[in-house]
Amino acid sequence: MGFFLTLPSGKENEDNEMFYGNQEEFLSTSVITASSDTEQKSRHEVVNVSDDHTVDLPSSNASSDGDQKSCQERQEFKWLIKNEVHKVFNQLREVLEAAARRYPVEIPEVETQVRQEKYVMATSTQTSQDQLKCILTITGDSITSADMTLKLHKHPNVVYHTTISVESPWRLQQIQDSGNYLRMAISYLALIPEQLEYISAEEVLTDLDSVLGKINRARSTLAIPRKRTIDELMNSKNMKTLTPSLPSDLAVSFYLQAHKLIFAVYHLTQAGGTVKFETLQSESPVTWLNEVLVLLSVALHRAQQLRDKVSVFLQYPILNLSGDATPIPLFQ
């Protein structure tokens, strides 16, 4: 490096020599300091690079671990599809077909026959035996014959008698509706190819939820009757099947609840502008109904178990199931 100074004359020369000498020393020191700073900076840069490299190593390992984990998840899902999903679908179909064969109505997907069954209704604890008597015959989903005798608390000396005949049957809509839901569930399962390879948990759940919904509706339709108002009951088409007709303040109803057939009578009264009604009830166990509810419960439980297993994979991005590695069972 070149460095030039012009020196003045006289005494000032000495002072200036001291000044410039110091300046030279200062400049020399600055150059050394700058050089040291550069070297130190270079060392820091090396350290930083080294640190960056050290930080990158776990990231590289994490990426490798992530790929390995993703591969394992794919294999677990593939194992579940191969060993569980279609197996459970076949089990569900068998259970539902067994339930369908117990229905007293025809279900096209299963070999069933319309059956005729006779019931003698027994009064409940709140109703005395002489208040309500009913003997009926059910053919398929309809009451084709019934003989009913009614006595009310407020009119103990008055006996009401009415009948249902085969020419004008009383329709038990619950049986038909439940059978329709069951038929749809069986048909849906039949349309799923056994060789179908699902590629995501969402696809499995779409089919499974559809079947679950139909099974649940089939069961709840039988176990829990739809609530109706008194006006709906009195104006229903079924009330017109009674011969002779009952007085306008009386309404009757037949419905299924859990494993029983219920016969209910409602007597309307007015007091102070308020409408009240007295209820009489008799019932009879239905053998086929109890068996159907048990089978539908088994199907629901088995389907829900599979749903819980498949739902585990919703949190994983299963993008490719083409791996040939040996599947590792997640659920045993």
Image (cartoon, grey):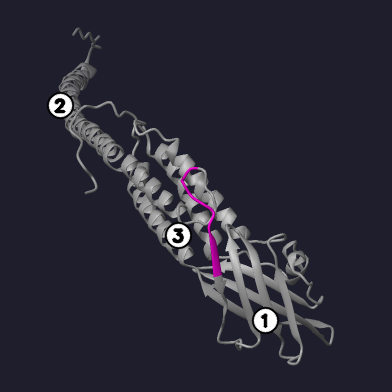
Q: Earlier in the sequence, mark 1 or mark 2?
A: 2
Q: Give the answer, above or below, for where 162 lies relative to 204.
A: below
User: Which structural element holds mark 1?
Assistant: strand
Residue 304 in percent (x, y) is at 38, 53
Relative to residue 316, is residue 28 drawn left or right? left
Q: Give the answer, above or below, for where 323 lies relative to 76.
A: above
Q: Quadrant of residue 129?
A: bottom right
Q: Earlier in the sequence, mark 3 or mark 2?
A: 2
The residue tagged 1 is 279
In the rendered image, residue 111 lying in the magenta stretch gets the answer: yes
Q: Amino acid at mark 3?
A: Val
* Foreground of the two, 117 or 64: 117
Magenta segment boundaries in residue numbering: 109-118
Say which mark, if any, is on residue 58: none
Q: Earlier in the sequence, mark 3 or mark 1?
A: 1
User: Which structural element holds mark 3?
Assistant: helix
Looking at the image, which residue is at 80% across and 83% down? 274
Q: Quadrant of residue 54?
A: top left
